[in-house]
C-alpha cells in the first residue's frame, strides 16, 4: 500500500472543497425557493416510528434543526410544529442530507489545528462539525476527541495527523461508513456495536502500511517513520498489511513495515495498582502507585474527566511506578495506566476512578487506604 503523498492529499482536498461548494449552492437554492413539492428519487425517506413534530424528527433523526422549515415546506406541511402520526414518511432533499454527514469535536486541549481546505482553525471549538476531507493535526501538547452519529469515538493524540476520508451514516437500510487516514502519531478509536435491528458500523483507519476495519471494538494505531503498529484493547479488528490479512482479538498487536511481513505480538496485560494505593488525592505530594509489570520498559499514565478517556487532562510517560498528582480542581477524575514494551506497543490499560479533594483549613484529611 502506497503512502499518501502531499500533492495527492492537496488534490483530494480541492476536489472535496469543490463538491462541498456545489452542495452548498444547491442547498441555498432550495432555501431561497422554499423547497419543492414533489419528492425526488434521490431524497432520503424517514418513516416516523413514534408521534413527533417535524421539528423533532428533523432534529433528533438528522441533526438538521436549521433546515426544519424548508423540509416541512418540501413535504407540503404548513408548520414545523405539525405532529406526524406513526408511519408517516418524511422526504429530505439530498443537499440537506449531505450536510448532516459529519462528526463533531467533543473535546479539545492544547495545540490542535482543524483544516477545511482554505479554512484553518486553531484550536477548533467544542461542537465544531468535521466533514469529509477535513484534516486534524495536533502539536506536542494537543489532544482532540471526535464523535460520530454512529457512536464511534476517535481520540487524536499529541503530534498526530488524521484525514477524514468518508462519512456516510444517514441511511437506515445500509451500513454506517466512517473512513479515516492516519499519517502521523497515534490515534485511538472505539466503535460501539449497533442494536441488532440496525445496520452495522463499518469503521476503518488507513495508515501508510496497513488498514484496520472494525464493526464494534476499541483499538489504536501508532505510526513511526518506518513502522506502523496496531493494538486491540476490546473486540476484534480485521487488518490488511504487508501482503497479509489478520484478525486481531483483544490483547493482540501487529507491526508492519514497508515491504516486510507483519509481526504479531501479545500486548502487555493491565498493570495492578499497589495494595493500599490511595484513590483520594489531597496535595501534589500524594501519588498513586502500581506494581512492576514484567516486560514493561515504561508506562503511560493518562488522567481524564471520563472513564472513556476522551476528555484527557494529562498524559505522562514514565519509567517509575507512580503517578504524582498535579494541582487540579477538586472533583472526580479517571486514571488510566498501561505498560509500554521494548517495541513501543502500548499494553492493556487499567482505569481507576480517583478523587482530587479540597482541603479545609480547619479539618485534617484522613487518607483512604
Image (spheres, helix red, strand yellow):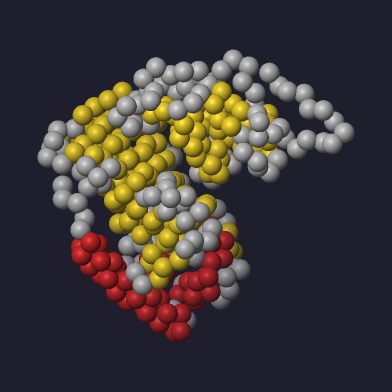
In which image quadrant can residue 254 be found? top left
Position of 290 relative to 43 (above/below): above
Q: Nearer the viewer, residue 7 or 225?
A: 225
In which image quadrant can residue 354 be found? top right
| Quarter that holds the C terminus | top right
Q: Residue furthest right?
A: 362
Question: Residue at left 49%, top 61%?
Answer: 123
**How many numbered marks does the figure carry?**
0
Q: Nearer the viewer, residue 142 or 34?
A: 142
Where residue 162 appears, as percent x and y from the top left, is 34, 53
Where residue 108 appears, as percent x and y from the top left, is 51, 53
Position of 301 relative to 140 (above/below): above
Question: Residue at left 26%, top 40%?
Answer: 228
Where residue 184 appears, as percent x and y from the top left, is 31, 49
Using the rendered image of the protein, determine whether residue 214 is visible from the camera's viewpoint: yes
Q: Nearer the viewer, residue 321 or 230?
A: 321
Position of 268 relative to 118 (above/below): above
Where residue 224 appears, as percent x and y from the top left, is 28, 42
Task: State left or right for residue 169 relative to residue 357.
Answer: left
Question: Residue at left 37%, top 50%?
Answer: 160
Q: Residue furthest bottom?
A: 33
Q: Nearer the viewer, residue 177 or 294?
A: 294
Using the rendered image of the protein, determine whether residue 86 is visible from the camera's viewpoint: no
Task: State left or right for residue 204 relative to residue 259.
Answer: right
Amino acid at each position: 500500500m502506497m503512502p499518501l503523498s502531499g500533492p495527492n492529499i492537496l488534490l483530494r482536498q480541492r476536489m472535496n472543497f469543490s463538491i462541498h461548494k456545489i452542495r452548498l449552492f444547491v442547498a441555498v437554492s432550495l432555501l431561497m425557493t422554499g423547497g419543492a413539492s414533489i419528492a425526488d428519487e434521490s431524497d432520503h425517506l424517514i418513516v416516523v416510528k413514534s408521534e413527533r413534530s417535524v421539528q423533532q424528527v428533523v432534529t433528533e433523526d438528522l441533526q438538521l434543526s436549521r433546515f426544519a422549515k424548508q423540509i416541512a415546506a418540501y413535504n407540503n406541511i404548513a408548520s414545523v410544529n405539525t405532529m406526524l402520526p406513526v408511519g408517516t414518511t418524511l422526504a429530505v432533499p439530498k443537499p440537506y442530507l449531505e450536510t448532516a454527514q459529519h462528526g463533531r469535536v467533543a473535546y479539545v486541549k492544547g495545540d490542535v489545528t482543524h483544516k477545511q481546505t482554505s479554512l484553518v482553525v486553531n484550536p477548533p471549538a467544542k461542537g465544531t462539525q468535521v466533514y469529509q476531507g477535513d484534516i486534524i493535526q495536533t502539536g506536542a501538547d494537543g489532544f482532540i476527541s471526535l464523535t460520530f452519529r454512529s457512536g464511534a469515538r476517535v481520540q487524536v493524540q499529541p503530534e498526530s495527523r488524521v484525514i477524514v476520508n468518508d462519512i456516510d451514516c444517514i441511511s437506515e437500510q445500509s451500513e454506517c461508513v466512517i473512513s479515516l487516514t492516519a499519517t502521523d502519531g497515534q490515534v485511538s478509536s472505539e466503535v460501539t456495536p449497533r442494536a441488532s435491528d440496525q445496520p452495522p458500523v463499518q469503521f476503518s483507519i488507513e495508515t501508510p502500511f496497513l488498514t484496520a476495519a472494525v464493526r464494534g471494538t476499541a483499538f489504536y494505531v501508532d505510526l513511526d517513520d518506518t513502522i506502523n503498529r496496531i493494538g486491540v484493547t476490546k473486540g476484534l479488528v480485521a487488518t490488511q498489511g504487508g501482503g497479509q490479512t489478520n484478525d486481531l482479538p483483544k490483547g493482540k498487536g501487529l507491526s508492519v513495515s514497508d515491504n516486510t511481513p507483519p509481526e504479531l505480538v501479545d500486548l502487555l496485560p493491565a498493570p495492578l495498582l499497589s495494595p493500599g494505593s490511595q484513590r483520594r488525592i489531597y496535595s501534589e505530594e500524594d501519588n498513586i502507585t502500581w506494581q512492576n509489570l514484567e516486560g514493561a520498559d515504561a508506562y503511560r499514565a493518562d488522567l481524564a474527566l471520563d472513564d472513556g478517556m476522551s476528555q484527557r487532562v494529562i498524559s505522562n510517560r514514565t519509567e517509575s511506578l507512580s503517578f504524582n498528582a498535579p494541582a487540579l480542581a477538586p472533583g472526580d477524575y479517571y486514571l488510566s495506566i498501561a505498560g509500554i514494551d521494548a517495541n513501543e506497543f502500548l499494553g492493556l490499560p487499567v482505569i481507576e476512578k480517583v478523587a482530587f479533594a479540597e482541603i479545609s483549613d480547619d479539618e485534617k484529611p484522613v487518607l483512604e487506604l
